[in-house]
Structures are given as C-alpha cells and as structure tokens.
Image: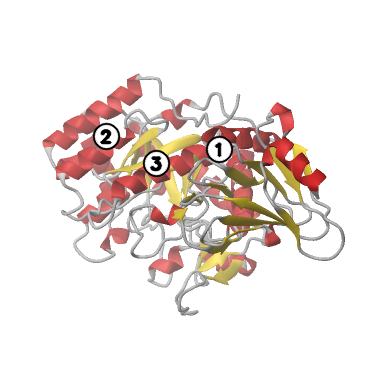
C-alpha cells in the first residue's frame, strides 16, 4: 500500500486515498496524463468499481449541475455546493444549461471523467465536510490534478478530451455564423397582452416589422431567427406543436416567401426547433410512433396532454434529415435547438443524430444547442449562454457570469452565442434602462456573438443607441466567437 500511495503522489495525485468496492486485491491503475500534461494524472477503473477519495475545500463548483430550486433561480448558486450530494453527471438532467462532468474545489483541485463508457456507475459523492469520493467503474477513467491549478488543469483536460473524442477546434467558420443575431422571442413576449399569448403572435407581418425596426435603428444586419410560435398546434394545445414542424399557414401563408423576405432585407434566416420534445398528437408521432419516448420526470403527469421526450433509440437521423431539409430547401441556414432538458446520456445521442443529419445536408448549416458539455461539443457548432431573468429577487448578474463561465470552459473550440441582451423577462420591472444597460455591458469584451431579442426602443432611446454602438463595435471588430479554453 505504501508503494502505491507513493506512486500516486508522484503522478500528481497528492495523497488521495484509494479504496475498493468488491473482493480481491486493489487493481487501480494510475498513469501520467497524455501528451506531456504531467501536472495531472489518469485513473482507470478495474473490473470492479474503484473508489477514489480526495480531500477538497468547499464550495465545490459543479458545471454539470444546472438543476435549481425556486430559491436558487437566477443566481447560479446551484452550480456551487457545500452540502453533501451524490451525482451521476452523465444521467443527471441537462436542465437549462449543463456543463462538463468535472468538479473544481475552492482551491483549484480538479477532477473530471474521461469516457462515457461505464457512465451508469460513474458518480461523484461528497460527504458535506471535506471528502469527495469518485466511483470509477470498468472502462471509466479520471483526470485528476491536486496541485490546485484550477483553470490550467481544466484546459489540459479539455485538450486531452478533444484528442480522445476526435474533434479539433474551429479556426474559421462560415461568415454568417459570426454575424449579429436577432431573435423574435422576447419581442413576442413584450407584445403579448395575455398569458402565453406570445406563442400566437409570430406572423409574417410580425417578422417584417421587426426587421424594419432594426433597419430603422441602423443596426448591422445578420441572422434573423424565428422562435417558438411559427409552427402548427394540431389539437389546439401548445404541447402538440412539439413534433409538428410545419409552419402555421394562417400566420405564414407562404413560409418560403417569409424566408425570401428575410433574405431580401439582407438577413440570414434562422429557425427555433425543440427537437428533443414530442407530443402524441404531433405529425411526427402520427407518422413515426417509435419516436415517442418517456414522459418528464419529477412532476405529475397528464398523459393525455403532456409532451414526452424523444426516444433516443429511434431513428432520429431520418426524422431530423426530413425536417431540417424541409426548411433548408426554403433558405433556413441556422437552427436553434431548444428543450434539451432530459437525461444527459439520452440527450447526447439525440444531439449527435441531429448534428449528423444537418451536416449531411450542408456542412455550413449553423447548429446551436444549449448543453455545453465536452462530450457534446463534437456535435455542436454554437453553444448559447442561455438567457437569464433580470429579476432583482435574485442575483441575476451572478448567473450571467456563471452561464458564460460554464459555456466558455465546457465547449472548447466552438462558437458562443451571448444570448438575449436584456434577458427573458419582458415585464416593466425587469426591462428597466438601468438593468438592460448593465446586462449589455456584461457582454462587452466577451468571446461570442451578440443576440438581440427584445427591441430596445420599448425601454429608452439610450438603450437603442448604446445597443447600436455595441453591435457595430462587434461587427466592425475582430468578431472573436470561438472558445480558446484549451492547451494549444
């Protein structure tokens, strides 16, 4: 045992205690990390589940843990834990925005899982005091750095993982990927006078007036994404729209003409699609019943009305190819994929098939997701920082910072969408001049392209002017949109 502990220490693991669940002699295998990154080490599981223990200092930063309580909403506190927990970062729900399966303690100690093989039994367990226990099943490996390197260790981990997962960072992208983006979502919400009315407000005329306002402001042209509300609702319920990816002909008599109008005004068409959800009354479920997966967990289920998750074992490639090509053929070049809130191990397969389908149609299609996980990154072009609510009940600036941190560090080599200037709350209390401008200022200098959703004239002329200054500074500048959080 003494020899083994000495070897672990030399490899960079400090004095981490290692125990074993099961019978027989300890079989844990510790190696120096790959490619000369000697500050960390790799731990490989044996045929039984190995237990690796580390002494850690709270709070622990858990980028994969995007689940929050009502009390935590808006502040990002759910990413930091000081109390006891046991998590499987591969099977935890992706929720709003779930990063890589790693943990960093308050002093910079770092540990991260390195393979999806054996994910079912790959867990982090914290005793609430100072001991983090990691279960390492056969086929799983860990990258551990106890030298309190923090970001340096995470960058090394990213570089090793990029090589293992066989993807390289983007060094250039199609020009339109780096352009400013405009999205109808919060503009729909601010125009609504009744609860959930914004889903029924998106029409051809709405889009045209939105674009004309941007042109009136003199803002730079870029992408124009139509958000939730452009599609049909077969049984009249909003949920039935999940899986019915056909334009509502009452709102858009000729969807091709809408796309043509967007292009004729100098913008690139984009479209929101919530592929990971499906409803039994949707057109896809009627055509392909095997696409119907599980219902949502952790809530009361109304099986007649509730949407379900897409079945990750179904032929998603064929489904996605059919839908994406339908809209690509009329001019859509960017797809905003939403609602990836299910178990991450299921979402990974769904993302992979969606991405493969799009790239088989045209490699320049921009595919945007909201799960910034190293295992998802190969199947992503753009990760959005995901919107926040500018609600003074919560520390919303902290959430803005945490969302950016998780995105930038968990999706190396990929583009970033700085989502929703002004946030997702369209109430007068949220959209004040002070808060809007504070939120806008937090994006300045960050890697990523800006996204305008609510048009700022609803707030003040100062907001219109300062938004324009920011957008033009970006458009005329370097347009740095790719995360460089890895070792070159």
The residue shown at (73%, 36%) is: 10
Q: Mark 3 and mark 1: span between their CA atoms?
A: 52 Å
Q: Secondary structure at mark 3?
A: helix
Q: Is residue 101 left or right of residue 32?
A: left
Q: Count neighbours of disc 2 (C-alpha within 10 A) and say few if under 14, some if 14 to 19, many if 20 or more.
A: some
Q: Count neighbours of disc 1 (C-alpha within 10 A) and say few if under 14, some if 14 to 19, many if 20 or more.
A: some
The residue under label 2 is: 441
The residue shown at (52%, 47%) is: 105
The label number, if any, that marks residue 148 in the structure image: 1
Q: Is residue 23 left or right of residue 313?
A: right
Q: Mark 2 and mark 3: span between their CA atoms?
A: 32 Å
Nearer to us in this view, 231 or 261 = 231
The tag earlier along the polypeptide, 3 or 1, is: 1
* 2 and 1 marks in contact (CB < 8 Å): no
Nearer to us in this view, 39 or 427 = 39
Q: Position of residue 488 (x, y in %)?
A: 60, 24
Q: Is residue 257 visible?
A: no
Q: Residue 358 is drawn in which quadrant? A: top right
Q: Secondary structure at mark 1?
A: loop
Furthest toward the right, the residue is: 24
**46 shown above or below 418:** below
Nearer to us in this view, 358 or 104 = 104
Q: Position of residue 309 (x, y in %)?
A: 55, 65
Q: Mark 2 and mark 1: span between their CA atoms?
A: 31 Å
Q: Is residue 464 left or right of residue 379?
A: left
The residue shown at (26%, 51%) is: 390
Q: Position of residue 409 (x, y in %)?
A: 51, 38
Nearer to us in this view, 8 or 473 = 8
The residue under label 3 is: 259
Q: Is residue 396 visible?
A: yes
Q: Is residue 206 left or right of residue 374?
A: left
Q: Secondary structure at mark 2?
A: helix
């Amino acid at each position: 045992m003494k020899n083994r502990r000495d070897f672990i220490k030399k490899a960079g693991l400090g004095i981490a205690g290692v125990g074993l669940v099961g019978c027989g002699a300890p079989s844990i295998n510790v190696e120096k990390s790959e490619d000369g990154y000697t500050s960390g080490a790799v731990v490989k599981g044996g045929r039984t589940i190995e237990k690796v223990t580390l002494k850690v200092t709270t709070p622990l930063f858990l980028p994969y843990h995007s689940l929050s309580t009502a009390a935590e909403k808006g502040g990002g506190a759910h990413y930091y834990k000081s109390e006891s927990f046991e998590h499987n970062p591969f099977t935890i729900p992706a929720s709003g925005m779930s990063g890589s399966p790693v943990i960093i303690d308050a002093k910079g100690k770092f540990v991260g899982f390195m393979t999806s093989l054996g994910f079912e039994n790959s867990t982090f367990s914290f005793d609430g005091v100072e001991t983090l226990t990691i279960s390492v099943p056969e086929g799983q490996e860990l990258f551990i750095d106890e030298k309190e390197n923090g970001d340096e260790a995470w960058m090394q981990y990213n570089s090793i993982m990029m090589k293992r997962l066989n993807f390289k960072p983007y060094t250039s992208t199609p020009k339109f990927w780096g352009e400013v983006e405009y999205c109808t979502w919060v503009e729909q919400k601010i125009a609504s006078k009744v609860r959930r009315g914004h889903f029924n407000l998106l029409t051809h005329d709405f889009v045209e007036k939105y674009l004309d306002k941007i042109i009136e402001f003199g803002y730079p042209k870029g992408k124009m994404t139509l958000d939730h509300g452009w599609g049909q609702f077969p049984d009249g319920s909003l949920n039935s729209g999940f899986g019915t990816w056909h334009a509502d002909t009452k709102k858009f008599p000729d969807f091709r003409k809408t796309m043509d109008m967007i292009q004729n005004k100098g913008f690139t068409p984009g479209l929101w699609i919530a592929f990971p959800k499906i409803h039994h009354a949707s057109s896809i479920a009627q055509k392909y019943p095997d696409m119907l997966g599980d219902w949502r967990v952790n809530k009361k289920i109304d099986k007649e009305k509730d949407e379900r998750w897409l079945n990750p074992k179904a032929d998603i490639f064929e489904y996605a190819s059919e839908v994406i090509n339908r809209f690509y053929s009329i001019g859509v070049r960017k797809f905003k994929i939403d609602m990836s809130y299910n178990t991450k191990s299921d979402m990974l397969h769904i993302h992979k098939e969606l991405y493969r389908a799009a790239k088989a149609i045209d490699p320049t299609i921009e595919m945007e997701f909201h799960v910034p996980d190293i295992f998802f990154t190969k199947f992503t072009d753009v990760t959005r920082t995901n919107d926040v609510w500018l609600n003074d009940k919560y520390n919303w600036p902290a959430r803005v910072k945490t969302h950016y941190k998780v995105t930038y560090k968990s999706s190396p080599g990929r583009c970033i969408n700085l989502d929703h200037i002004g946030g997702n709350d369209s109430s007068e209390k949220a959209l004040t001049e002070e808060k809007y401008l504070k939120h806008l200022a937090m994006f300045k200098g960050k890697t990523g392209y800006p996204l305008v959703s609510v048009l700022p004239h609803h707030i003040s002329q100062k907001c219109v002017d300062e938004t324009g200054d920011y957008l033009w500074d970006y458009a005329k500048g370097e347009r740095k949109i790719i995360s460089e959080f890895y070792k070159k």
